Image: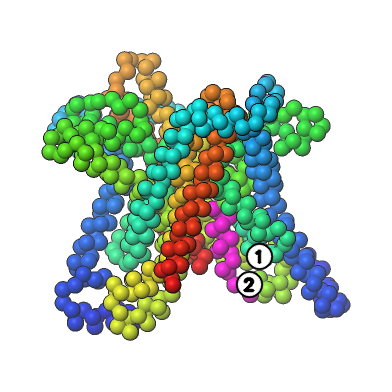
């Protein structure tokens, strides 16, 4: 490549060389995306298309492969009206996500502006704040939340064994608060729920914090200097410079939050989809559920993006 | 400049709740400590329980700090589970997968960022689509591809029935090669945004000096993409390490930490059950110690890498504004 370019340099007319150069470069581009193309075709396109076929058929798995018998919308009907726990769980995951979405966005924005300031031991604080990024193993999250109170109970002497590692912690905490007799029941369970949610939110906002931190870093410092010369207080320059400059990233972070919460493997809906395929071996139903779920994700994503666009437009206008 | 201006303002207003004032610093410190506590709480309580001797577990007065801290739980867990084998397997699989992922994603990102070939925007759209679609949507069919592996049907033409790749790291490595492992769309997105922001003049200068496309990529783009590469490498390593879905689907019998952590209580109960009566307090102590042992390598690595990581983060331009 290099030798040819050098050899050809003095002999060929300029215009032709430039054209072939551009074309040659474009051809090199294909080489760079070759692995990606292979992946998209063989590991994404083909399985996704097959799974779409599965969704409309009865799948029988044999010793050396599978056969499909088309059955129309039967699987979709089963997923929506026969297997009610799927519908319920899907709606719950969507609602849960919508409940967490503003909290995660606000928290990660706030935490990122904190991390962007200069103070002593900043590296330590940054390490701790980014720790959820490292530890947010789906398994770990359940595990930590589930086991923490259990061990506390163990330590305080009235050891109670919780039935499962997942999702019972708030019930325990609520019981604890109610039995302490200070708080009424509704307040106690609300507090317990909020306490759980704080942990979830902090754990779930790792990447969003990253997004906001890089956005904050990319604001040119000259802007602040100008503002300071013009006599703006730090508070004013935060709301007039920092916030508007990072505003576009709110959408990016929200989109990531939505995708992340819908596709996290701790998600209860995905668990059902998985169990339907690998424990009940009903692959057709599982595929139908998965596609309904995908449509739900796209719907929520589209809705949030639409609303946010309108909000941002109004803010800018 | 800014500090100067701040000083002037300080003179004008005595007591204020602004950045720089002691009140603000105190408030900030409180919030930082609070959030750090929330993040570290599960780890701290695990550590407390893991260090307790059995007597402390039943002692009402002992809540956080064990009266006689012992390492007995850790020793017991190390006997119950084959820790070195798990560590080596997990380390090997995650570093190999991360290496392949970062290489494939960087190539793809460079291709998408700098070359204007036909179908580029379609390709990028598909990359984002892989991020939005849950892997579970095409889980069964992907699983079958590797259960009866005949090179994605290419060897099927010759009547080859296919071999099972389940319980080998190959499915993960192949998916890493094709940028289809977990969250690889995000890596491509981040790297593409970063490479797009590098000045084109760098490459043009190299072209004029007679460098080929490969040389430009290797000698010009890669060194300049350092910060983004560090961020993506750390994330891909850590996420592969933690990826329960891939591990339990394609490598359920392999000794990986992610699957072990998911059913640690079960494993320990089973290992315990052979020797004596199952005791929930014991199981809790061992589970906590075991979880800490599993997390420990990751935390140590992150503390070592965090300096580069955070620096990388600052310059990644993840946001690409």
Q: Is residue B155 above or below residue A45?
A: above
Q: Which residues are magenta?
A: B186-201
Mark 1 belongs to which subunit?
B
**Quick check: A13 left or right of A146?**
right
For the residue carrying disc 1, how many other residues have a C-alpha within 10 Å: few (<14), some (14-19), or many (20+)? some
Q: From where the camera sits, is residue B284 visible? A: yes
Q: Quadrant of the C terminus of chain A?
A: bottom left
The residue at which mark 2 appears reads as B200
Query: Residue B176: horizontal and vertical position, in percent?
Result: 61, 45
Asked if marks 2 and 1 touch (Cβ < 8 Å), the reply is: yes
Q: Dot 2 lies on which element?
A: helix
Is residue B48 a member of the stretch shown in magenta? Answer: no
Disc assigned to residue B114: 1
- In depth, the one of A305 and A143 nearer the eye is A305
Q: From where the camera sits, is residue B174 visible? A: no
- Residue drawn at point x = 27 percent, y = 79 percent: B6
- Residue drawn at point x = 55 percent, y = 53 percent: B187
Look at the magenta stretch and give its main secondary structure: helix
């Amino acid at each position: 490549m290099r030798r040819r370019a050098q050899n050809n340099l003095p002999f060929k007319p300029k215009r032709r060389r430039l054209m072939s150069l551009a074309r040659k470069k474009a051809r090199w581009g294909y080489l760079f995306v070759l692995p990606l193309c292979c992946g998209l075709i063989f590991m994404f396109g083909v399985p996704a298309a097959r799974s779409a076929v599965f969704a409309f058929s009865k799948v029988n798995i044999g010793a050396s492969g599978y056969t499909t018998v088309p059955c129309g919308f039967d699987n979709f009907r089963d997923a929506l009206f026969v297997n009610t726990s799927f519908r319920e769980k899907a709606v719950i995951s969507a609602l849960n996500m919508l409940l967490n979405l503003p909290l995660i966005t606000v928290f990660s924005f706030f935490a990122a502006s904190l991390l962007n300031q200069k103070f002593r031991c900043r590296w330590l604080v940054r390490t701790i704040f980014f720790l959820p990024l490292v530890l947010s193993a789906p398994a770990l999250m359940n595990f930590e939340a589930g086991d923490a109170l259990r061990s506390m109970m163990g330590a305080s002497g009235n050891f109670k064994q919780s039935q499962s590692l997942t999702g019972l912690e708030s019930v325990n905490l609520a019981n604890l608060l109610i039995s302490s007799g200070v708080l009424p029941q509704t307040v106690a369970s609300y507090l317990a729920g909020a306490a759980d949610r704080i942990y979830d939110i902090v754990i779930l906002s790792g990447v969003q914090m990253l997004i906001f931190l890089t956005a904050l870093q990319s604001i040119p410092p000259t802007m602040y200097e100008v503002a300071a010369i013009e006599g703006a207080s730090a508070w004013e320059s935060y709301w007039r410079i920092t916030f508007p400059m990072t505003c576009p990233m709110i959408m990016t972070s929200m989109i990531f939050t939505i995708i992340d919460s819908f596709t996290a493997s701790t998600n209860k809906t995905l668990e059902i989809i998985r169990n339907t395929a690998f424990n009940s071996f009903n692959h057709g139903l599982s595929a139908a559920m998965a596609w309904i779920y995908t449509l739900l994700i796209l719907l929520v994503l589209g809705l949030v993006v639409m609303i946010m666009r309108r909000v941002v437009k109004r803010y800018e206008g | 400049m800014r500090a100067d201006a701040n000083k002037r303002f300080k003179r004008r207003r005595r007591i204020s709740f602004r950045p720089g004032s002691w009140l603000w610093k105190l408030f900030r410190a409180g919030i930082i400590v609070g959030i750090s506590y929330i993040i570290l709480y599960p780890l701290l309580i695990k550590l407390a329980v893991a260090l307790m001797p059995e007597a402390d577990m039943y002692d009402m007065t002992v809540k956080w700090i064990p009266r006689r801290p012992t390492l007995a739980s850790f020793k017991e867990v190390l006997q119950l589970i084959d820790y070195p084998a798990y560590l080596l397997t997990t380390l090997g699989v995650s570093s190999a997968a991360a290496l392949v992922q970062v290489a494939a994603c960087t190539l793809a990102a460079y291709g998408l960022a700098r070359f204007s070939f036909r179908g580029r925007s379609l390709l990028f759209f598909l990359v984002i689509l892989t991020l939005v679609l849950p892997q579970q949507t095409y889980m069964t069919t992907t699983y079958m591809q590797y259960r009866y592996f005949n090179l994605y049907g290419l060897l099927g033409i010759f009547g080859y029935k296919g071999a099972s790749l389940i319980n080998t790291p190959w499915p993960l490595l192949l998916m890493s090669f094709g940028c289809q492992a977990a969250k690889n769309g995000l890596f491509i997105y981040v790297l593409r945004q970063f490479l797009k922001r590098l000045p084109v003049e760098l490459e043009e200068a190299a072209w004029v000096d007679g460098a080929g496309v490969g040389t430009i990529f290797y000698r010009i783009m890669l060194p300049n993409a350092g910060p983004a590469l560090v961020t993506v490498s750390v994330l891909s390593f850590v996420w592969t390490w933690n990826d329960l879905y891939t591990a339990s689907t394609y490598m359920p019998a392999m000794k990986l930490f992610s699957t072990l952590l998911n059913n640690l209580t079960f494993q320990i109960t089973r290992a315990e059950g052979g020797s004596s009566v199952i005791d929930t307090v014991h199981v809790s102590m061992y589970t906590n110690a075991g979880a800490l042992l599993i997390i420990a390598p990751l935390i140590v690595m992150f503390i070592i890498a965090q300096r580069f990581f955070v620096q990388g983060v600052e310059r990644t331009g993840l946001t690409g504004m």
